[in-house]
């Protein structure tokens, strides 16, 4: 980088700091460029259509106020390259504090927002609970929760809201069982989970929801230190006795929120798609094919729309483009998954045998790949199969164009999904 470029960069950063002190939050939704906002928008179940004549861009650079460069990465190979380059990129939000005064001046905690060596250590602390062997004890719990929620749906006046009666309770009760979080706290964590992913509310509201959840979890961690239970919270305070309550609460928060909004979104969006397609519904009720179907739904729907922001620690070449030190990179998981080759047919035929094709990035990639991926897969397979076995005549209770989808959100989903279970036709 030449002298002129270095001087220009320093001047831009000085203007940025001055703007931040004056109260400018360049991450406020109304100040973000449209290409960034478009990463969080959809047309129903589909990505936003490109304007006629505009080719798909695998990488695009845009600028925030005061000159900060943000790369939008959409190509499948390029997204995998960014997400696996842990030496070149940082996940710590504190590195972006010069961009927005709303960002915290200390680490939020959680696997998704920390770098090695802390990330390496805490992931190793959590990993045993998320292996196939570690999750085996949760399978009967999930099946029991699913059965109970299906009973609740049957007893409720028709139509029922699938979000409220099934899609949320199944992952929420499961993750609370895993962590050892009291059922009395469930509703509060649900509300905070929804708020933190709402782009429209702004960064202050999102970070406020994160902070509130962490404070609740810090109190639970303090209780566990006095009397460790058998859940993951008790395991954390035992294995991480030298870590402070804030750090442990951040880890628990990542597990909790990572398993709520995402799984609820997948259950509702997947159900909507399956209601459109009788062939796919048959595959959902067949134990030999539901696994491959679930993988295709994960790829096709990609409810986590964008990976956590990456901060370039050094100059690096991605897909033939030079990303400079200090640039911010946003990876679109949805667009990357739609770039994996030929789209599946409308019947969700899927590929890759009983397990399906797992080359998608719905769970991310690399060192920060979602630790709870296998838990999510188990929940979804059980939920889809049981739901359509129990209610083969289930149908939408409103016109599809009336379904309220989330607006700008990091995690996509439905606000509600009214369905008629078809019980009167049985």
Image (spheres, helix red, strand yellow):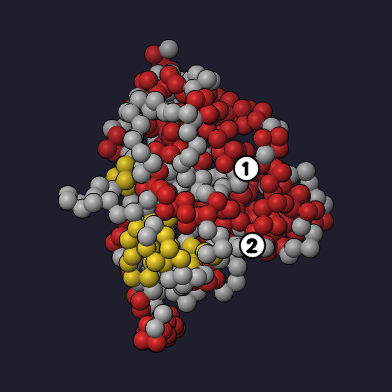
As displayed, is residue 167 above or below residue 65?
Answer: above
Identify the residue shown where x is 29% and y is 34%.
Answer: 400
Q: Are marks 1 and 2 in contact (CB under 8 Å)?
A: no
* Residue furthest out toward the left: 53
Q: Earlier in the sequence, mark 1 or mark 2?
A: 2
Q: Is residue 60 left or right of residue 82?
A: left
Q: Residue at x 62, y 31 (%)?
A: 142
What percent of the width, then of the height, locates residue 2?
39, 83
| Location of residue 402 with respect to 113 vertically, above or below | above
Q: How would you rate the neighbour count of disc 1 (Cα within 10 Å): few for under 14, some for 14-19, many for 20 or more? A: many
Q: Which mark is residue 16?
A: none
Q: Can the viewer see residue 182?
A: no
Say whether residue 70 is left or right of residue 106: left
In the drawing, does residue 208 fall left or right of residue 279?
right
Question: Which residue matches tag 2?
Answer: 116
Question: Residue 193, position in %: x, y?
Answer: 52, 52
- Residue 143 in percent (x, y) is at 61, 27
- Residue count near mark 2 (Cα–Cα under 10 Å), binned few <14, some 14–19, many ≥20: some
Q: Residue at x 52, y 20 (%)?
A: 288
Q: Secondary structure at mark 2?
A: loop
Q: Quadrant of the N terminus?
A: bottom left
Q: Secondary structure at mark 1?
A: helix
Inter-mark Cα distance, 1 to 2: 26 Å
Give the residue number, with chain letter if any, for mark 1.
Answer: 175
Residue at 63% x, 27% y is 144
């Amino acid at each position: 980088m030449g002298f002129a470029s270095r001087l220009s960069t320093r001047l831009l950063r000085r203007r940025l700091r001055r703007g931040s002190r004056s109260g400018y939050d360049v991450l406020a939704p109304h100040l973000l460029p449209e290409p960034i906002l478009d990463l969080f928008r959809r047309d129903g179940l589909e990505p936003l259509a490109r304007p006629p004549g505009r080719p798909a861009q695998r990488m695009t650079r845009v600028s925030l106020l005061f000159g900060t460069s943000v790369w939008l990465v959409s190509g499948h190979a390029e997204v995998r390259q960014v997400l696996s380059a842990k030496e070149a990129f940082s996940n710590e939000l504190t590195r972006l504090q010069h961009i927005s005064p709303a960002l915290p001046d200390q680490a939020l905690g959680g696997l998704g927002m920390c770098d090695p060596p802390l990330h390496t250590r805490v992931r190793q602390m959590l990993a045993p609970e998320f292996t196939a062997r570690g999750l085996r004890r949760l399978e009967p719990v999930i099946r029991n929760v699913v059965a109970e929620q299906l009973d609740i749906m049957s007893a409720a006046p028709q139509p029922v809201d699938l979000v409220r009666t099934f899609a949320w309770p199944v992952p929420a009760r499961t993750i609370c069982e895993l962590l050892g979080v009291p059922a009395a706290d469930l509703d509060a964590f649900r509300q905070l989970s929804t708020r933190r992913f709402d782009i429209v509310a702004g960064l202050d509201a999102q970070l406020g929801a994160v902070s509130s959840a962490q404070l609740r979890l810090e109190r639970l961690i303090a209780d566990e230190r006095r009397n460790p239970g058998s859940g993951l919270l008790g395991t954390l305070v035992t294995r991480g006795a030298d870590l402070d309550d804030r750090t442990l609460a951040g880890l628990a928060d990542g597990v909790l929120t990572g398993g709520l909004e995402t799984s609820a979104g997948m259950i509702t969006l997947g159900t909507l798609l399956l209601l459109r397609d009788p062939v796919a519904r048959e595959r959902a009720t067949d134990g030999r094919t539901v696994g491959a179907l679930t993988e295709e739904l994960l790829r096709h729907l990609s409810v986590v729309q964008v990976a956590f922001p990456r901060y370039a620690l050094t100059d690096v070449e991605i897909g033939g483009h030079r990303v400079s030190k200090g640039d911010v990179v946003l990876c679109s998981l949805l667009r990357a998954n739609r770039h994996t080759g030929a789209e599946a047919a409308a019947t969700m035929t899927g590929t890759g045998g009983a397990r399906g094709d797992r080359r998608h990035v719905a769970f991310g990639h690399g060192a920060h790949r979602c630790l709870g991926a296998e838990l999510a897969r188990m929940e979804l397979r059980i939920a889809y199969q049981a739901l359509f076995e129990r209610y083969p005549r289930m149908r939408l209770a409103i016109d599809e164009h009336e379904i309220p989808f989330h607006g700008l959100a990091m995690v996509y989903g439905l606000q509600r999904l009214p369905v008629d279970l078809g019980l009167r036709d049985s």
